[in-house]
Image (spheres, rainbow, N blue to C red):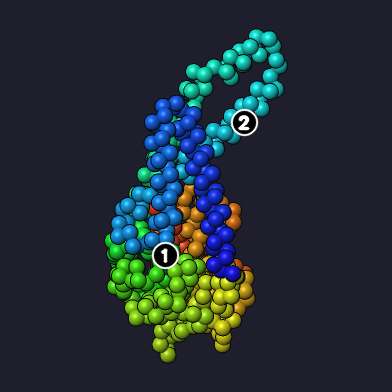
Amino acid sequence: MFPVVRILFGVAFFATFAFLNVYLYRRLVRDVTEEPWLRRVAVAFMGACFAAIPAVRWLGAQLESPTLAATFMSWWGFLVHVLMVLIAVEVGRWAWRRKARRVTSTSEGAARGQVDVDDPARRLFLARTVAGAAAGTGAMLSTYGAYRAFTKPELTEVPIRLRGLPKALDGVSIVQLTDIHVGAVIQSRFLDQLVEVANAAKPDLVAITGDLVDGPPSDLLRHVQRLGRLQSRWGTHFVSGNHDYYSGWERWAPELERLGWVLLRNRSVRIGDAAASFDLLGVEDWGTRFGGGDYDLDAAAAGLDPSRASVLLSHQPQNVEAVAAKGIGLQLSGHTHGGQLFPATLIGQAIWGSLNTGLSKVGESTFVYTSRGCGFVGPPMRVGAPPEVVKLILTSA
């Protein structure tokens, strides 16, 4: 089921992407120039960028050139930003035409309108103005987005009063990393920055909440091993994300355990000592349910004492009502990227609501923190949703 869904999604995505490339060619090239050689160059360039995107996704780190991969993937983001401007122009044009139809027709006005519509020089001027504005806006937003995606992530500190936390553990901290997406573009240098930010926060525990990789261990393990330098009192704990499943989760799991990480596969561990502790739970990715996967909150919470402090690691901010019903005090998630790229940030907000990013509350005493994530998927850009490393500071309620 899972592979079939991915294939269907891939076909639909690339069909849509092909349509948008054709539309972009018509608006940015065909409508603004009749020079045959310019049109041929544009077709060759856009065709190469279109073909390179699936190649980058499939070949991953085999390309051995994250800069080249990022360059091709940037076309995706540029297209989104240009399309956003062109859609705004189309909406404005539709509104203008609708208003024009309401104006009382006179022979003079009709004649003037006819000249305006049919004047080739005017049409060419408008087409070039719109194309220039769209391309310029797309280039500026894409440049900013790339800069923001590759700079050090923000350290977001979030204090949380966790019910049942012993006084002796007041101020204990968890650093959350999520949605790192190690692959064709995100490799060792990027990971070194994450390690630097995370270690500088001096956490008591590191939690990685899925979507670590976009590719198999044979391609990416040498990069992921850089994260073995994460330092904390109670070590690094990990739960899977949907992209980890796409990348061969059963092959990755033993490699991560060899890094010394604790994999929480529908189970819990006690953090602390006999005098003061809390429960840390983890579940497999929620999306695996649709492929016969193993998400099992009941197994993870088996024997849970609701009077004790508890934290759940779950890649997607899903099933939160059931989490609250079990008396779990805090869920840490990612997956949404906070939308990653405007206008997807608005779409994410519409889909996820308060669970899209940041801290929210479910029921009377269950908190959910959804991180915007560290890396990116698709375009190597972030606009309106900067990357973050989260430091959660727990205090007793």
- Residue sitting at 42 percent across and 42 percent down? 46
| Label 1 crowd bin: few (<14), some (14–19), many (20+), radius 10 Å | many
**Above or below: residue 107 compared with residue 96:** above
Residue 295: x percent and y percent?
56, 76
Q: Amino acid at mark 2?
A: Trp
Residue 142: x percent and y percent?
40, 44
Disc 2, SS: helix
Residue 273: x percent and y percent?
40, 87
Residue with the mark numbered 1: 214
- Residue sitting at 41 percent across and 84 percent down? 272
Residue with the mark numbered 2: 94
Residue 141: x percent and y percent?
41, 43
- Residue sitting at 43 percent across and 50 percent down? 51
- Residue sitting at 52 percent across and 43 percent down? 20
Q: Amino acid at mark 1?
A: Asp
Snapshot quadrant of residue 251: bottom left
The alpha-carbon separation of the residues under discs 2 and 1 comes to 42 Å
**Above or below: residue 172 compared with residue 361:** below
Q: Which mark is residue 232?
A: none
**Above or below: residue 159 compared with residue 70:** below
Between 8 and 292, the one lying in front of the other is 8
Residue 54 in sight: yes
Disc 1, SS: loop
Farthest-out residue, top: 108
Farthest-out residue, bottom: 274
Which mark sits nearer the N-terminus, 2 or 1?
Answer: 2
Between 102 and 219, the one lying in front of the other is 219
Answer with left or right where residue 226 lies relative to residue 325: left
Which mark lies nearer to you, 2 or 1?
Answer: 1
